[in-house]
Image (cartoon, rainbow, N blue to C red):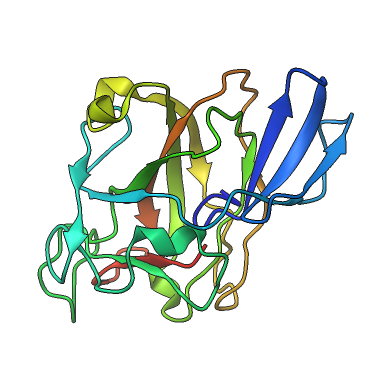
Amino acid sequence: MMIPNFENFVVFDKKVEKLRVYDYFSGELIQTNTLRPVSPGQVLTSNNETVYGVWNTTAGSDSNPASNGTGIGKHFPGQGPYTVFDKNTNTKYVNFGNCNNITTGSPDCAQNTGFYLTLQRGASLLVAFRLATANSYLLRDPLTITIEGSNKNSTELTRGLSWTLLYRGSSGISINQTRSTYGSMQWLPKNSESYASYRFLVNLAMNNGANIPSIQYSE
């Protein structure tokens, strides 16, 4: 967001009362007194976050874990949710959702898939995110998403009641966007709560009713 591929975390540091913009992977930061506009900083943490894929999951509902493989409830081998944070637009996360036929698929294969993670740096205030497209198949881009936050312990994160809805709206990716590029920065509604864990779910893809076998995105 950027945290899926999210490229940047934007964090408000209450101690210094300034907005800090972190690029999710490098550790450098840019600090500013103004809330908007703000330039992307550089990532705060390394790319070794533990990320859990999910499918058949909606905002407020329990998480159904996705596992490595092909078919229903799987993410493609070597293209798991950890790729969302590797700062590499040549890799991608591919989730088959509720589809068993990975060749033709169906109109709703991509729906209600995603991931969650607990930040190694601890609770952070997320105010904006940016996604990147995968290397192929325009129709498999995310169209609308939700983002939730939680401060529950790890054993509670599979429970829907552990999550608070923070965002429901556009992925920031445009129709016919160039492959392996970032979409526009999307700002969350005004939020003052820091969360240690975040859950990202795709509601709809760009397929507009056409059959697709999976959802995919790079960062």
- Residue 51, image x, y percentages: 36, 50
- Please report the residue visible at 60 percent of the width from the left and 34 percent of the height from the top: 126
- Residue 72, image x, y percentages: 12, 61
Q: Report the side of 150 relative to 107 (left or right).
A: right
- Please report the residue visible at 74 percent of the width from the left and 42 percent of the height from the top: 21
- Please report the residue visible at 44 percent of the width from the left and 46 percent of the height from the top: 145
**Viewer-proximal residue among 4 and 29:** 29
Q: Report the side of 214 relative to 193 (left or right).
A: left
**Viewer-proximal residue among 207 and 93:** 93
Q: Report the side of 124 relative to 143 (left or right).
A: right
- Residue 166, image x, y percentages: 50, 28
- Outermost residue toward the right? 33
Q: Is residue 148 above or below residue 169?
A: above
Q: Is residue 47 above or below residue 178?
A: above
Quarter where residue 182 is shown: bottom right
- Residue 46, image x, y percentages: 56, 54
Q: Is residue 26 above or below residue 133?
A: above
Q: Is residue 56 visible?
A: no
- Please report the residue visible at 15 percent of the width from the left and 57 percent of the height from the top: 73
Quarter where residue 217 is shown: bottom left
**Viewer-proximal residue among 143 and 72:** 72
